[in-house]
């Protein structure tokens, strides 16, 4: 399904795979120019080619959300000008029992899932507020997780980072909303993607795979559809909090 996002300019982080790649696709198919931002340049180039082949506009920008984004922002501005739709989707889930003491994984999740969201938001705040001031729609979309609210054994740090994203979204809205910028926090449940492939604990992988079997899963495109729907509403309508789950996940 597509929506009307003509004349919109989007940045999607974590566009190399999973939910981010599908968000980029549906936004482009809905008429937006889309900057694809994550670390794997080759994957981004493939996706940009696919979007171009469909008649859309995409720019591949290889960048790490935890680092300096100056060059990435310049590249987006030089090609597309001002951005009015930012999707903070990049994230990592590195699950292990707390007594494994994986401080390296904790730091990586905090850096990517929280600091990365802040970096990208900071990089495009002026664009978003200027777009709203000019009378157009402006969107900040954060991809959090149902894990922000539930208890999953072995996922303490991951779910804590997602709780931070959810609370950050609610608070940012108090600053952005009065300026005309929507903030939408999306909390997906179990969704098909590469997320689990980074977990190096076989027992945890088995456990999560069993959840997928028991509770079902969404496709990444089904989550992406929700983002395109929310950002294509009239500019005074803000779906601020969206929990999207497989019907059988309770
Ligand atoms: N799948 C689920 O069940 C589920 C449920 C709830 C929430 N989520 C959330 O959905 C979001 C997308 O995840 P996914 O499920 O689609 O998994 P995924 O396929 O692993 O996608 C994660 C994306 O983030 C990018 N990324 C990771 N670290 C990055 C960094 N430092 N800088 C820039 N990009 C980075 C990766 O690309 P590169 O490796 O190329 O950088 C990748 O494209 C995450 O925030 C995740 O927490 C997923």
Image (spheres, rainbow, N blue to C red):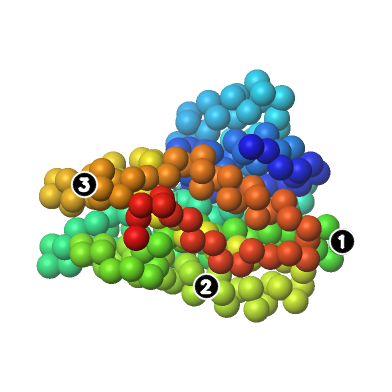
Dot 3: what SS?
Answer: helix
Q: Residue at x 16, y 63 (%)?
A: 97
Q: In which quarter of the view is residue 126 placed?
A: bottom right
Whole-angstrom CA distance, mark 3 to mark 2, is: 31 Å
Dot 2: what SS?
Answer: helix
Q: Earlier in the sequence, mark 3 or mark 2?
A: 2
Whole-angstrom CA distance, mark 2 to mark 1, is: 25 Å
Residue lying at the far right of the rendered structure:
134
Q: How busy is the neighbourhood of tag 2: few (under 14 within 10 Å), some, or many (20 plus)?
A: some
Position of the C terminus by quadrant: bottom left
Residue 51 showing in the rendered view: yes
Foreground of the two, 225 or 66: 225
Q: Which mark is residue 4?
A: none
Q: Residue at x 59, y 58 (%)?
A: 141
Q: Position of residue 72 (x, y in %)?
A: 61, 47
Cβ of mark 1 under 8 Å from ligand 1: the answer is: no
In the displayed structure, does residue 140 sit left or right of residue 96? right
Verify CB contact (< 8 Å) between mark 2 and mark 1.
no
Whole-angstrom CA distance, mark 3 to mark 1, is: 49 Å
- The residue to which callout 2 is attached is 168
Q: Residue at x 60, y 30 (%)?
A: 48
Q: Residue at x 75, y 44 (%)?
A: 5
Q: In which quarter of the view is residue 154 placed?
A: bottom left
Q: Is residue 225 above or below residue 167?
A: above
Q: How busy is the neighbourhood of tag 1: few (under 14 within 10 Å), some, or many (20 plus)?
A: few
Verify CB contact (< 8 Å) between mark 3 and mark 1.
no
Q: Which mark is residue 134?
A: 1
- The residue to which callout 3 is attached is 210
In the displayed structure, does residue 27 sit left or right of residue 234? left
Q: Position of residue 147 (x, y in %)?
A: 36, 63
Q: Position of residue 226 (x, y in %)?
A: 58, 50
Dot 1: what SS?
Answer: loop
């Amino acid at each position: 399904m597509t929506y009307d996002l003509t004349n919109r300019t989007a940045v999607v982080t974590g566009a190399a795979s999973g939910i981010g790649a599908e968000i980029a696709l549906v936004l482009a198919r809905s008429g937006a120019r889309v900057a694809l931002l994550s670390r794997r340049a080759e994957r981004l180039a493939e996706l940009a080619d696919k979007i171009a082949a469909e008649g859309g506009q995409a720019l591949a920008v290889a960048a790490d959300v935890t680092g300096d984004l100056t060059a990435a922002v310049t590249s987006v501005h030089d090609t597309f000008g001002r951005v009015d739709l930012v999707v903070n989707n990049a994230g990592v889930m590195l699950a292990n029992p707390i007594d494994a003491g994986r401080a390296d994984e904790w730091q990586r999740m905090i850096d990517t899932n929280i600091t990365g969201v802040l970096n990208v938001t900071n990089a495009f705040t002026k664009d978003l507020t200027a777009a709203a001031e000019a009378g157009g729609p402006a969107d900040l979309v954060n991809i959090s997780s149902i894990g922000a609210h539930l208890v999953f054994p072995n996922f303490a740090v991951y779910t804590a980072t997602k709780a931070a994203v959810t609370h950050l979204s609610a608070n940012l809205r108090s600053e952005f909303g009065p300026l005309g910028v929507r903030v939408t926090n999306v909390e997906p449940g179990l969704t098909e993607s590469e997320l689990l492939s980074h977990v190096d604990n076989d027992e945890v992988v088995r456990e999560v795979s069993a959840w997928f079997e028991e509770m079902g899963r969404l496709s990444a495109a089904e989550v992406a559809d929700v983002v395109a729907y929310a950002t294509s509403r009239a500019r005074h309508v803000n779906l601020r909090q969206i929990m999207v789950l497989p019907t059988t996940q309770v």
